[in-house]
Image (cartoon, helix red, strand yellow):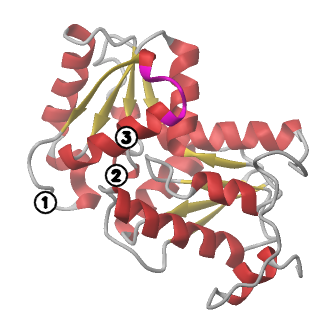
Amino acid sequence: MKILIINPNISQDVTALIEKEAKRTADRDTEIIMETAPFGVEYIETRMEAVIAGYACSCVAAERYGQYDGVVIAAFGDPGLTGVKELLNVPVVGMTEAALASACLLGQRFSIIAISDRIAPWYRETVERSHLSTRLASIRSLKDPLKNVGTVQEDYTDRLLEMCKEAVQKDGADVIILAGAPLAGLARSLEGKISVPVVDGVSSAVKHCESLVKLGPGIAAEGSFAKPPVKPNKGLPEKLAAILNRTC
């Protein structure tokens, strides 16, 4: 099995964090193919940045078309997820939807721990899109500007742990979701320090993607996730246009 994991931001440091956690999580016979967005921003906080990242994901998925059995979009908030699901004939899994699915299997109410205040509205809308708002206990986030997106875990270890505990004790969370690729792998280092289950988005997405590939549920030939209709287009990357034009 080959899984393409796309980091929708341009940080190679974050890609390295994602890859490390993905390879620790994946089955031994699963090949992880890592790609970083060829354009965009260092890390995604806003809706506009998510739009740019979603297009970057579609370009990467098209460039690698035919080389993978499943795709993971490795940014919390799932930029471009539903569009890439329409584009491809293989399972496409987002970090958010995977983490939410895992959390809902582990408890009734979950809290999201985020790296930025500005991210919170976008994350809340992502939860609403999944129709799980009634199970969201809270979104708690770091208040300080990030020193380096690749070292968030090291720079804010104590505060991240404190926020997790506050979400349990003050907000009533049954499960903690560590949001965002910069926090990939942090759940392992927090093991035993938090009194409820902790969900990592990268590992959840990898395992859910592996499961869907093995299930072989088929593809959407009809319904809202069928491929977009063929129509004139202009200025798109060659391989993305080929998929849309049904010529590959």
Quadrant of the frame with the C terminus: bottom right
Numbered badge on residue 147: 1
Horizontal relation, residue 41 to residue 76: left or right: left
Which residues make up the magenta segment? 129-133
**What residue is drawn where x is 54% and y is 32%?**
130
Tell me which secondary structure the magenta stretch mostly adopts. loop
Q: Nearer the viewer, residue 206 or 143?
A: 143
Q: Nearer the viewer, residue 27 or 196?
A: 196
Q: Quadrant of residue 124?
A: top left
Numbered badge on residue 182: 2
**What residue is drawn where x is 89% and y is 41%?**
216
Question: Is label 2 in a helix, a strand or a loop?
Answer: helix
**What residue is drawn where x is 88% and y is 76%?**
246
Work out whether 89 lies above or below 101: below
Horizontal relation, residue 30 to residue 42: left or right: right
Counting from the top left corner in percent of width and height, residue 10 is at 39, 72
- Precedes in sequence: disc 3 or disc 2: 3
The mark tally for this picture is 3
Question: Is label 1 in a helix, a strand or a loop?
Answer: loop
Q: CA distance from mark 3 to mark 1?
A: 22 Å
Callout 1 crowding tier (Cα within 10 Å): few <14, some 14–19, many ≥20:
few
Residue underneath mark 3: 123
Callout 3 crowding tier (Cα within 10 Å): few <14, some 14–19, many ≥20:
many
- Precedes in sequence: disc 2 or disc 1: 1
Residues marked 3 and 1 touching at CB (< 8 Å)? no
Q: Is residue 140 magenta?
A: no
Counting from the top left corner in percent of width and height, residue 197 is at 43, 17
Q: CA distance from mark 3 to mark 2?
A: 15 Å
**What residue is drawn where x is 83% and y is 45%?**
223
